[in-house]
Amino acid sequence: MSQAISKAKIHVERMMHRNSIAVAGESIASYALLKLIPAVGGGGASIGINMAMVLDVSGSMYEEDGTGKSRISRVQEAACSALNFLRPNDSIAIVAFANNAELVLPTTLVSQKDKIIDVIMRIDMFNVDAGGTSMDQGIELALAELQKSTGTGNISHLVVLTDGETSGEQLCKEYAKASAEKKINFSVIGVGTEWNSGLIKDLASLSNGKWHYIDVNQVDSAQKVFASEFQSLAAVGFRDVQIHFRLMKDIKIRRVRMVVPEIKDLPLVEVEDRHSVAQLGTLEKDKTSRYILDLSLPKRPDGKFKLLDVEITFDTGSGVKESSGLIPIEMAYTAAGNGYINAEVAKHIDEVQIFELNKNLQNAISTGNTQEATRVAQSIEKKGEVMGARAAKKTMLAKQVLAEINQGGKVSKKTQLAVDDAARAVDE
């Protein structure tokens, strides 16, 4: 069952996992897919970017990882190149951190590109002690600088890059929470294999942001990550986007996940009885995003019933909140048995299942439970083979995990990071 509602700014399409259901007991699990499709020109004028980059300049950033280039030089080149995706009236500030932190470039218009590039290329020459990693101090300085230029016509975005463990982890988490509250976008990039992936993912989750991984052995990996991040920012057409769910009696939403452009869990906040909200942050003006709702549906007599109303609220840069209006999601009940499966929804459910298996795999590896890691990796391998070409990389990496366990009983950090990175990817 697929339904589409045409709106001035965002088209909303929704479909159920099955076109009808039969509930034998008191309730049944089901899924709905939401597609948010920006209307042509729906994002209005381009939203300005107010960015701060927080770059690690600790001693380990001089390692080459077998690429022939140091980590810091790869990052410098990638950051300078990515500036080409920004517009002259966008702005950027730069903070360098190691044992301490320094604002090395106050907020500067991208029209002064030569000045920005000069600072990036001298990022390791400022008054920063390279003998430690205090990411919390870097984030604190960047947030303070960003808030000086936050306005209704722009989006504030913080990009943090590190290659190691950091002090002040709890402070980092508090700053990530504060970023979400202040509508400041947050992206964290890990370089090499020694950074704390658990912390980085926590920061991305707490800030409703993103995390990236720069592969230690791929020379162009830094270029790809920075280009993707800056290009995505420049394409933002909607900010402060929220999905409101207003549930009918006895309907429950167990979980909401983004499945395109990447797979990630979305926190669901209940603002009043049977009314919950998921924060999406920003959306690009020319890219569709998709979300899977994990539902619990009660027993009903035969017939078509409304399960919930969905409302999308957003700001196109004017500071005024706009709405899609209430959009119903319905389900047909029939005692004759479950109806046919929607292949598009089923495809995303498959991808989510591998994503969840990866969580179990990472937990088994981190706790040293080799037997459980083997079992889960085998499950990922089997699931990936059923999914075919679009899960080829996930299948290959599951086999790599099994090979490393068989050879030495341990999974390398590089393989763990690659598996974790691939698990959230879609449409390979």
Image (cartoon, helix red, strand yellow):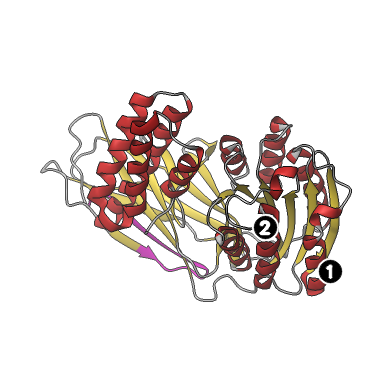
Q: Residue 209, image x and y in percent?
A: 59, 48
Q: What is the spatial separation of the Cα atoms under label 1 and label 2, in whole angstroms?
A: 17 Å
For label 1, the residue is 115
**Mark 2 nearby-residue class (10 Å; few <14, some 14–19, many ≥20):** many
Quadrant in the picture for residue 410: top left
The quadrant of the picture occupied by the N terminus is: bottom left
Give the quarter of the image for residue 27: top left
Q: Main secondary structure of the magenta part?
A: strand
Q: Which residue does the image show at 85% across and 45% down from the upper left? A: 128
Q: Quadrant of the C terminus?
A: bottom left
**Residue 50, above or below 249:** below
Q: Amino acid at mark 2?
A: Val
**Which segment did they paint magenta?**
4-18
Q: Please tell me whether residue 384 belongs to the stretch shown in magenta.
A: no
> Crowding at label 1, few (<14), some or many (≥20) Cα neighbours within 10 Å?
few
Q: Which residue is pictured at 34% across the width and 51% down the height?
A: 348
Of 251 and 29, which appears nearest the observer? 29
The answer to which of 279 and 367 lies nearer the viewer is 367
